[in-house]
Image (spheres, rainbow, N blue to C red):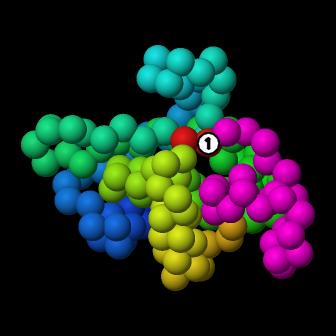
Amino acid sequence: MNHASMTRFVATVRRSVAIEGIVNVLITTNKEMKSLNASFRRKDEATDVLSFPAEGVNGLAGEIAISLELAKANAERLGHSTSDELKILILHGMLHLAGYDHEKDHGEMSKKERRLRESLNLPVGLIERNTIDSEPSGLNQRSTKLARRRV
């Protein structure tokens, strides 16, 4: 995913989830993600995506950090492109910036993510990977085997 297409995708998703303000996206390494995860979530492991709402910074909606290494590995394991995986991670992070929380909202974020993912022609999303076990739903079965916890 080149810079221009990422910028367009971020703008599209930002409008779709009604986020006002700038969203910065950092594509980084597992080492940096592990450091961010340890600092902000007290978890000593890399994660694929983290979201940081701006909370009062004028003109800034928030920031999203993504591990390129994990995005590439997930894409390969799930049989889709790294570009699609980056888009899935951006979408997930943007929903968190918009105030959704799949750990507390009784499926609201999952439904929104699924609708947006389908409208954007993206493969299986993060929440679905963690909640679907062995249901015969037409999903790539490898997508149901991810055990890492996501933000």
Q: Position of residue 23 (x, y in %)?
A: 30, 50
Query: Position of 92 compared to 68: left or right?
Result: left
Q: Position of residue 93 (x, y in %)?
A: 46, 50
Q: Residue at x 33, y 56 (%)?
A: 98
Q: Residue at x 68, y 62 (%)?
A: 128
Disc count in the image?
Answer: 1
Q: Residue at x 24, y 48 (%)?
A: 61
Asked if residue 119 is among those painted magenta in the image, a careful observer would answer: no
For residue 95, above or below residue 40 = below
Q: The N terminus is located in which quarter? A: bottom right
Which residue was labeled with disc 1?
Answer: 150
Q: Secondary structure at mark 1?
A: loop
Camera-nearest residue between 76 and 4: 76
Label 1 environment density (alpha carbons within 10 Å; few <14, some 14–19, many ≥20): some
Q: The C terminus is located in which quarter? A: top right
Residue 69 seen in render = yes
Predominant secondary structure in magenta?
loop
Among all residues in the image, which is located at the extreme left? Answer: 58
Q: Residue at x 61, y 42 (%)?
A: 150
Q: Which residues are magenta?
A: 125-149
Residue 87 seen in render = no
For residue 73, above or below residue 81 = above
Disc 1 residue type (three-letter): Arg
